[in-house]
Image: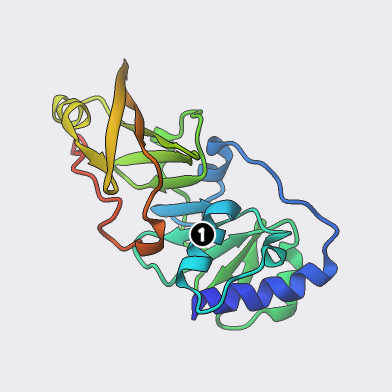
Amino acid sequence: MILKKIIALLSVLTLFSGCIGNDYSSVELVENSPYPEFIYLNKDMLKIVANKTSEEPVSDYFFVIFDGTYIDKNNYSKLAVKTPLWRFGSLFVNNDIKTKNGLILLNSDYVGSPDLKYNTPLNYNDIIIYNKNYGIFIEIGQEYTSAEIITENLPVNKYFMENIKNISGKYIINREIIEKEDILIGNYVLEGGIPIGDMNNSVFDMNITPKS
């Protein structure tokens, strides 16, 4: 139902569009999230999700003015579409559609800003999974998938990052763990692909512990 709303809304917005989507850094994407804990998919990842979950193939035409989508990790029915044409969303505002700060919110209000303690400049932003305990930043390649995990520098977290066998069901081929004072950054090379078409509340859960 939510996906159909996005497609219907975008099909109207593209009538106004001479725009091209923007590229944002991982830092900007985390800062702009309307949810404290979220999953972010850029437009390319959303195309994959849309075509895996839609009964009919979704044309690339619908994603022309689209930058990405935030999903509230605590309620997957709440979405925020990031688009340069977000102001046109006010034409369709009702109880289910709202606009704010570059976003069209579907079934959602602005919930709050994320804790920025893990918002260090990183390399990947095809998919971002961010919560109070860690951030995961993913890039989908043709042959391999790359991922960075950032969390607090605790012995239990370091052990976990050194010994985890897979991330979201994709086996780890290579890894490097970097310690930077209060944080750990894990750089991982995974087998290709991420099963984002089957996302649920457990897919990106990691056994990572905060200090308190």
- How many numbered markers are drawn? 1
Q: Is residue 37 above or below residue 147?
A: below
Q: Is residue 129 above or below residue 164?
A: below
Q: Is residue 12 left or right of residue 112?
A: right
Question: Which x, y percent locates residue 53?
Answer: 46, 71
Mark 1 burial class by Cα count in 10 Å: few <14, some 14-19, many 20+:
some
Front residue of 89/211: it is: 89
Residue lying at 21% horizontally and 39% vertically, measured from the top left: 208
Q: Is residue 19 above or below residue 155?
A: below
Question: Which x, y percent locates residue 69?
Answer: 55, 58
Q: Is residue 79 visible?
A: no
Q: Is residue 83 visible?
A: yes
Badge 1 marks a residue whose secondary structure is: helix
Front residue of 197/6: it is: 197
Name which quarter of the figure residue 19 lies in: bottom right
Q: Residue furthest front?
A: 143
Residue lying at 13% horizontally and 30% vertically, measured from the top left: 156
Name which quarter of the figure residue 196 lies in: bottom left
Front residue of 126/108: it is: 126
Name the quarter where the C terminus is drawn: top left
Q: Amino acid at mark 1?
A: Ile
- Say which residue label 1 marks: 48
Residue lying at 34% horizontally and 29% vertically, measured from the top left: 188
Q: Is residue 46 above or below residue 207?
A: below
Residue lying at 76% horizontally and 70% vertically, measured from the top left: 13
